[in-house]
Amino acid sequence: MNIFYIGSQVAGFLAFILSLIAYHRKKKSKIFQTMTVANILDIAHYTLLGAYSGSITKVIALIRNEIIIVKEKNKKFNKKIVLIILFAIYLVSGILTYKNLFSILPILAAMIYLYFIWNGNELTVKKCAFYCYFLWLTYNICIFSIAGITSNIVSIISTFIAIYNEKKKLIPNKE
């Protein structure tokens, strides 16, 4: 193991811990601030691994999250053209960072997630995220990211529980 690999895993685990903390924050602004730091650490994580499609996906996620925050306040950003531009950016970045079939997985996951997060309700977004985590898990296995694999497994389990609990609330009690 070299210093870059160890550094990448440290950054990845710190990003994972911050993302866990983020969703326990009280204010939406604090959640996004914490997730911004987690994304920056993920960018370092994937860059140190030489996993550039994972890295660029996290860079675009920073921009995407800002646009989603702004579009809630400003109707100008809630147009299909903004969504199409984001898709185009993902597509171009996927082409530029292509190494092999597995290198398109983070781009594919991000594009699917973007489609559902743009106008989806909470349950739909959670279901989408659940399946996208499997694409990320496969990618992290291929690039040998222990931090990424750990993060994805915890996220898959956590999201499954959240979906299950939300579905239980929708089913009327037969007592």
Image (cartoon, helix red, strand yellow):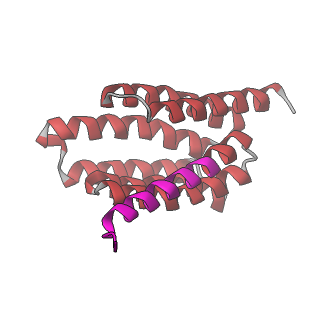
Please say if 28 is above or below 56.
above
Q: Residue furthest left?
A: 75
Q: Quadrant of the N terminus?
A: top right
Residue range of the region highlighted in magenta in the rendering: 153-175
Q: Residue furthest front?
A: 175
Reply yes or no: does residue 167 show up in magenta. yes
Reply yes or no: does residue 168 show up in magenta. yes
Please say if 9 is above or below 98.
above
Residue 27 vs residue 64, the one in the foreground: 27
Q: Left of 82 or right of it: where is 95?
A: right
Quarter of the view holding residue 115: bottom left
Q: Is residue 4 visible?
A: yes
- What residue is at 71 percent from the left and 37 percent from the top? 49
Q: Is residue 104 visible?
A: no
The majority secondary structure of the magenta stretch comes to helix
- What residue is at 81 percent from the left and 25 percent from the top? 3
Residue 19, x across and y down, in percent: 52, 34
Residue 113, x across and y down, in percent: 41, 55
Q: Quadrant of the C terminus?
A: bottom left
Residue 2, x across and y down, in percent: 85, 29
Residue 123, x across and y down, in percent: 35, 58
Q: Left of 87 or right of it: where is 129?
A: right
Q: Residue furthest right?
A: 1
Q: Residue furthest bottom?
A: 174
Residue 9 vs residue 30, the one in the foreground: 30
* Mark count: 0
- What residue is at 18 percent from the left and 47 percent from the top? 78
Q: Left of 27 or right of it: where is 146?
A: right
Quarter of the view holding residue 18: top right
- What residue is at 19 percent from the left and 40 percent from the top? 72
